[in-house]
Image (cartoon, helix red, strand yellow):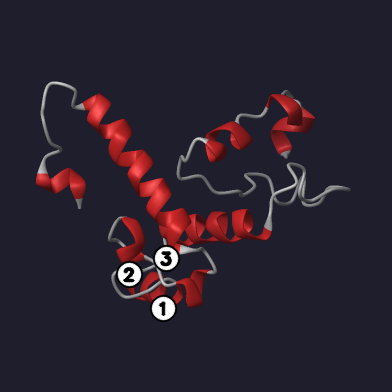
Amino acid sequence: MSNNSLFLDYHRNPFPMFFQRGLNVSLSTDDPLQIHLTKEPLVWKLSSCDLCEIARNSVYQSGFTHAAKAHWLRDDYFKRGPGGNVIHKTNVPNTRIAFRHETWMAEMQYVYAGRTRLPEEVDH
């Protein structure tokens, strides 16, 4: 939001495109005391499922301790795909988590184009 008032219009912000393409994104502010509210807090008309996924991403990416992340997400939150998700804690359907994981795996196949399979340490 601060970028909008400083130099970047909402409509040119890459967040919605990054989110739609499956990047692990979260929303936060870098200037909470300068810009702390807007007339429309959900500028991009995100669904409740979108908001839950973004909240899950925010906890996952945060500097919280492993114990705090395990409490809010699940004990093995660090596993990729549905194995790292509990819908009753995150409100993010396993089908969405599976889709994000499958998309990530396909993208990684492009990155590792010379290899037939992803290295085991990258897959998990």
The x and y percentages for residue 46 are: 69, 49
Name, please, the residue furthest toward the front: 95
Out of 34 and 57, give the one closest to the viewer.
57
Q: Amino acid at mark 3?
A: Phe
Residue 103 as seen in the image, left or right of residue 25: left
State the count of labels. 3
Compare marks 2 and 1 and give the one earlier in the sequence: 2
* Above or below, 111 relative to 2: above
Compare marks 1 and 3 and give the one earlier in the sequence: 3
Q: Residues within 10 Å of mark 1 (few under 14, many from 20)?
A: few
* Above or below, 27 relative to 17: below
Residue 17 as seen in the image, left or right of residue 61: right
Estimate the spatial distance between the alpha carbons at disc 2 and disc 1, rounded to whole Å: 9 Å
Task: Give the number of the disc on residue 64.
Answer: 3
Q: Nearer the viewer, mark 2 or mark 1?
A: 1
Out of 123 and 29, give the one closest to the viewer.
123
Disc 1, SS: helix
Disc 2, SS: helix
Q: Amino acid at mark 2?
A: His
Please give the residue where the numbered disc 1 appears in the rendered image.
Answer: 71
* Above or below, 71 relative to 110: below
Please give the residue where the numbered disc 2 appears in the rendered image.
Answer: 66
- Which image quadrant is residue 80 in? bottom left
The residue depicted at 58 percent of the width and 32 percent of the height is 17
Q: Is residue 62 visible?
A: no
The residue depicted at 73 percent of the width and 23 percent of the height is 7
Kindly indicate whether the residue at mark 3 contacts the one at mark 1 (C-beta within 8 angstroms): no
Q: Amino acid at mark 1?
A: His
Q: Is residue 86 visible?
A: yes
The x and y percentages for residue 64 are: 42, 65
